[in-house]
């Protein structure tokens, strides 16, 4: 039985490397870093850097009065979604969107807004009327559906760093569904934006974030995020929003939309081991990868590229390397690998879509150039435990067309996606 194909017809990005897909992919190509010194200081934290989005103007999306009643991720997510829809040629004001839905993948959601309202209450000021609606993640998906004019399912996935990749996988499953009323198109966005002392302190307490001091050498701050490098000391907190327009292949064809990629497979498992540490045998992570490949109807050696979760924590980078070896066997050493987190930090629940847009953008030359393998920047010193190909420092040309996106999350979660460039010639069989 032939299941409906699911294609990607548009992408959007608000990133530390710039606003828009072209700026984001171009930044990935040239190995630019979006990690910057913090614009605030607080005696309660040791962190000095983050990957923020200073080029993004929320006023380009909504007026100040509207901005004041939503968390920071909302205007970012709206901008990314609108770009993805525009690139897909979908104008909600001129199209029936009853079968077009939205999935939001976010880790912390409106925590910044909630903390601000708590501060206001403690200071004797009146908190916002919208405190509760912004504190419940599902309402944020509704906020986006309202802003975009989409009348299909409006849902939120929040399971840590796997939020956006799981949102893509679940949206793909909805589009494949034969049930009456199933959507024909889904806008899927991953967004998180909470670079502030409270969240930085929380990460420091877990000892997962870089606290390297750049006060004597501020020019080196962009090198703070070092996936797979022997000198890595944790991730750099990031922010941003990345979106894709997913459609049933027949729906996209009927309206004349040209796909840029194909969603092929999805797999998810749980270690059921520890709330913040992966199981040391990485068996469930490897199984999620194999499930995604099987869902795509492929053999492991059909995968040509891997976007690693690659957070730059000592433990995770070593264990993820082990998981890829377990999943792919000898083929692991033939894979082209990379992690974009050296460039954009760790945008938490948004990272799965940041990885997907980076990888597919590179495979298709979305910045106007030739297809390339993105680099893992700041990878200068070899770690013997991380001995696969991570494309260190500089991008290189590639003919790869099929890639795997790997994500690991607090809560012992594992999530993997298989994506192909539109011309990869792969059809999805059940």
Image (cartoon, rainbow, N blue to C red):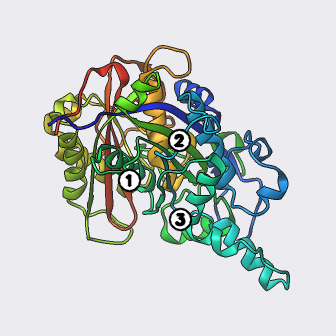
Label 3 neighbourhood size at 10 Å, few (<14), some (14-19), many (20+)?
many
Location of mark 1 (residue):
166
Task: Please give left or right for residue 306 compared with residue 298 in the image.
Answer: right
Vertical order, 263 against 287 (above or below): above
Q: Residue at x 20, y 48 (%)?
A: 291
Q: Name the spot of residue 189 as percent of width and height, x first.
A: 52, 47
Q: CA distance from mark 3 to mark 1?
A: 15 Å
* Location of residue 308 in the rendering, given as x and y in whole percent from the top left corner: 37, 42
x 39%, y 59%: residue: 409
Mark carried by residue 243: 2
Q: Position of residue 416 (x, y in %)?
A: 31, 47
Residue at 67% from the left image edge and 66% from the top image edge: 112
With respect to residue 315, does 240 lie above or below?
A: above
- The mark that comes first in sequence, 3 or 1, is 3
Is 222 located above or below residue 335 in the figure?
below
- Comparing labels 3 and 1, the label whose residue is closer to the camera: 3
Mark pair 3, 2: CA separation: 17 Å
How far is disc 2 from disc 1 in space, using C-alphas? 13 Å
Is 350 on the left-hand or right-hand side of 309? right
Q: Is residue 273 visible?
A: yes
Q: Which residue is mark 3?
A: 138
């Amino acid at each position: 039985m032939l299941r409906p194909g699911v294609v990607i017809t548009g992408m959007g990005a608000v990133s530390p490397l710039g606003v828009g897909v072209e700026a984001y992919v171009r930044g990935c190509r040239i190995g630019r870093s979006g990690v910057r010194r913090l614009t605030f200081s607080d005696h309660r934290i040791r962190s000095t850097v983050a990957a923020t989005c200073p080029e993004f103007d929320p006023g380009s999306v909504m007026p100040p009065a509207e901005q004041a009643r939503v968390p920071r991720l909302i205007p970012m997510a709206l901008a990314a979604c609108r770009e993805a829809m525009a690139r897909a040629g979908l104008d909600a004001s001129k199209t029936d969107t009853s079968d077009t839905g939205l999935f939001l993948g976010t880790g912390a959601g409106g925590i910044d807004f909630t903390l601000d309202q708590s501060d206001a209450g403690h200071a004797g000021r009146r908190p916002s009327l919208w405190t509760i609606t912004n504190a419940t993640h599902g309402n944020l998906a509704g906020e986006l559906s309202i802003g975009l004019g989409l009348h299909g399912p409006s849902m939120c996935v929040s399971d840590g760093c796997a939020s956006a990749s799981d949102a893509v996988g679940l949206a793909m499953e909805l589009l494949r569904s034969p049930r009456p009323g199933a959507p024909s198109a889904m806008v899927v966005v991953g967004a998180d934006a909470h670079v502030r002392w409270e969240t930085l302190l929380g990460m420091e307490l877990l000892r997962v974030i870089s606290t390297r001091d750049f006060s004597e050498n501020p020019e080196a701050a962009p090198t703070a995020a070092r996936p797979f490098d022997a000198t890595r000391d944790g991730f750099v907190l990031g922010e941003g929003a990345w979106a894709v327009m997913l459609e049933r292949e027949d729906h996209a064809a009927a309206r004349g939309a040209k796909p840029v990629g194909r969603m092929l497979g999805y797999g998810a498992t749980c270690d059921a081991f520890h709330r913040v540490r992966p199981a040391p045998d990485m068996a469930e992570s490897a199984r999620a990868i194999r499930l995604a490949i099987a869902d795509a109807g492929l053999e492991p050696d059909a995968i040509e590229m891997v976007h690693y979760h690659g957070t730059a924590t000592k433990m995770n980078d070593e264990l993820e390397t082990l998981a890829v070896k377990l999943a792919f066997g000898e083929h692991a050493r033939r894979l082209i690998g990379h992690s974009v987190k050296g460039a954009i930090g760790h945008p938490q629940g948004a990272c799965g879509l940041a990885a997907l847009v980076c990888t597919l953008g590179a495979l298709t030359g979305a910045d106007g150039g030739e297809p390339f393998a993105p680099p893992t920047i700041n990878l200068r010193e070899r770690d013997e435990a991380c001995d696969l190909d991570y494309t260190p420092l500089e991008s290189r040309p590639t003919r790869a067309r099929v890639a795997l996106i790997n994500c690991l999350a607090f809560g012992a979660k594992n999530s993997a996606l298989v994506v192909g460039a539109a011309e990869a010639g792969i059809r999805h069989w059940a």
